Amino acid sequence: MLDNPYDARTSIGGCPCGAHASLSEHNSVQAAFAKLTQPPHSDAAPVAEPASAARDTDTLMADLFEAAVVKAVLGADPSRRSFLNLVGSGTAAAAIASVLPMGFIREVAAQAPRALEKTKLDVGFIPITCSTPVIMAHPMGFYSKHGLDVNVVRTAGWAVIRDKSINGEYDAAHMLAPMPLAISMGAGSNPLPWTLGAIQNINGQAITLATKHRDKRDPKDWKGFRFAVPFDYSMHNYLLRYYVAEAGLDPDRDIQIRAVPPPEMVANLRADNIDGFLGPDPFNQRAVFDGVGFIHLLTRELWDGHPCCVFAASRDFTQKMPNTFQALMRSIVEAASFAHNPANRKQIAEAISAQNYLNQPVTVVEQVLSGTFADGLGQVRRVPERIDFDPYPWHSMAVWMLTQMKRWGQIRGDVNYTQIAEQVFLTADAGRAMRELGGAPPAATMRKHTIMGKEFDPANPEAYIASFAIRRS
Amino acid sequence: MFASVRAKSALLSILLLALFLGGWQIAATPTAGTGPALDPEYAALLGASAQQGKQTPMPTPVDVGLRIAKHLEAPFADRGTNDKGIGIQLAYSLARVLLGFGLAALVAIPLGFLIGMSPLVYGALNPFIQVLRPISPLAWMPLALYTIKDSAISSIFVIFICSIWPMLTNTAFGVAHVRKEWLNVARTLEVNPLRTAWRVILPAAAPTIVTGMRISIGIAWLVIVAAEMLVGGTGIGYFVWNEWNNLSIANIITAILVIGVVGMLLDHMLGFATKLVTYQE
């Protein structure tokens, strides 16, 4: 009955509490019982603090419960009114309270599923289009819709976002998909249980080369090239390594790969310090916009539907503040499904290009999100799937990343792939958020993926690693 | 004679500036369209210079001037967490610098007094000072972030640790080199040690101490920009990083000018203080 009255997708009947036939009837009950219920319980019910939005929500929820109880006890409207007129509202409240533990009911109501442990949150992001759901949820109101007051904080780099998250300055943050795995396992930092709540974007990356290499489109010709990726623990790093290794180049010996912050990729490409990069947008498109490079390929041509950036939080946060976390998840999942619709992309591009968020020219962001873009070679390409948004975190994606971490020597020894994937990727929570918003998450959590035409079976990770000729393990 | 030299050097400064700006303007002005004709739909998706088949050039001095004027229009506008006016960013940086510098002065000046007055303490602490003094501010940053676990306090700590040394060594030096005759006179008059320190040593060492402070505030201002670029959030250093992220060279040049002017003002303030405490022997 009071299943989810604050959720916009839940259809609420004639009145907010569902106990009355019409809104006007509900309001009359509310008005009568607002006076009736407050004084006797002011000490027993710790809910009357109108300080924050959450408290208001809790109080309202408690009022609805109480009104429903009172209505159940006193019966329909006419008889209740006459009863109240007869005995006075204070007496009635005391009479009911003597039979029913009203303070207790109010307390239970306040702790009902929607009670948020914390509403003012800091969420860190890196200014790239991968983080579209986390960013757009602020200007487009998805956080506030779920009762949260989120401050989205632009952050200087991946190491900083990791450290600020570990230090607790951020409640949750935008991260690269392999980072929660790496943090949980202590690769590149101290081990700390971390979780991945939702995938933010799929696809949406590209390999950009300097304009002078416009004739070297075959990776076999790339021996000696210097490449940049955003971070060691990134899909960018693994996809670039995979791609050149498939062409027969050893990514550790035949080319150089450096971790470089995305904006510096464009500056380095311009200064001829690197030959290309596999980086996040809008910087691929920015290189074209500034006339320093061209888009060699989109990463969806390597693995269509690959995960890239994610929404992550510490296990500690998800356990101590489950409702807040779930509200965040609903905000992100709802933003992602809004962004999934191509018709909304232009509006999103305008909202997130602003100085407060990405701080980029709108045309650049729009080309990335719409998939109608200049490739830097004189062609306008139309690839609506250039970037897409699908929040469901498949455990098999985690297993694939772990195989690549092991393949390239970032982790060693025996790896319990499935167990780590299930601990870090909160697929069930994402599925729950999708269901609550009326979506239909997949039933399975593992599936086979196809990367550059080769099938990856998450049931056999070791055999998959062994099938590659070029590897470090 | 003096006035005319000053006038001449001012004239020369202006001439140099004009030459520099003129050269920059000419070098940065894009040459008119000679590139291949592009499909208009394609061209619409590119930046102005890429349409000519060229890279986006450096901004001209005129571009930068216009940008500065735009920033100065609303320096204290607060348009959201990540979009604050340049005046607000400057205020954040100045507050951090003054806090870190103030704490450093509180520690360095009494400690420097102690070191300067006691050869024993000087000998004991000198090796540590010598090792810690040349460490780059940014080398402290990861350690501070790791141990303090708060980026705002970390940046203040880095300013503290970097601005403490010149004040410490200068205070110790000034105190140790007070003229022996003055101390002897004080001793002959049986002035107690505390009074000697306050009335004889402090005024005698004051010019050296303030010079140390002047060096320190310069270092603190250098450090804050680097520290804020690293941890981000607020401040003029973050502003530079943010505009770098946007690849907006005009904004970066604006910030560089602002950093220079504020650094000069800070230095002048302590230069003025030095004049106040200087004495003629």
Image (cartoon, coloured by chain):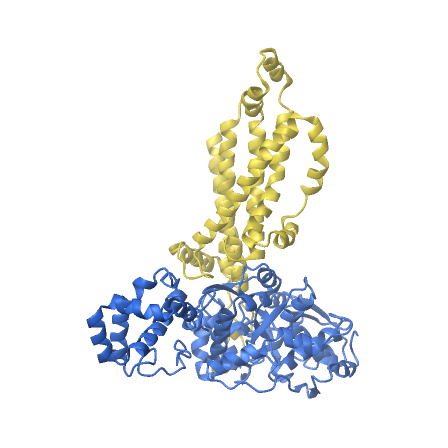
Chain colours: A blue, B yellow
Q: Nearer the viewer, residue A368 or A266?
A: A368
In the rendered image, which quarter is residue B108 located in? Answer: top right
Up the image or down, A468 lies above or below B179; here it is: below
**The N terminus of chain A is located in which quarter?**
bottom left
Q: How many marks?
A: 0
Left or right position of A396 against A81? right
Quarter in which the C terminus of chain A is drawn: bottom right
B57 w.r.t. B36: above or below: above
- Which residue shows up at 34% across the image and 73% down it? A64
Residue B7 in picture, x, y percent from top left? 46, 37
Does residue A405 appear left or right of residue A84 in this picture? right
Q: Quadrant of residue B195?
A: top right
Query: Residue at 67% across / 41% down in the picture?
Result: B133
Q: Position of residue A41 (x, y in %)?
A: 34, 63
Above/below status of B213 relative to B135: above
Is residue A125 at least partly visible in the picture? Answer: no
Q: In terms of depth relative to the viewer, which is nearer, A34 or A414?
A: A34
Percent of width and height locating residue B187 = 61, 14
Is residue A227 among the parts visible in the rendering? yes
- Towards the viewer: A344 or B249: A344
Q: Percent from the top left, x then y, of residue A232?
A: 68, 68
Please say if A305 is above or below B267: below
* Residue closest to the far top: B188
Is A90 positioned to the left or the right of B215 in the image?
A: left
Q: Residue drawn at (48%, 64%), measured in percent from left and top? A: A121
Residue visible at 62% across and 28% down? B174
Q: Is residue A416 left or right of residue B230?
A: right
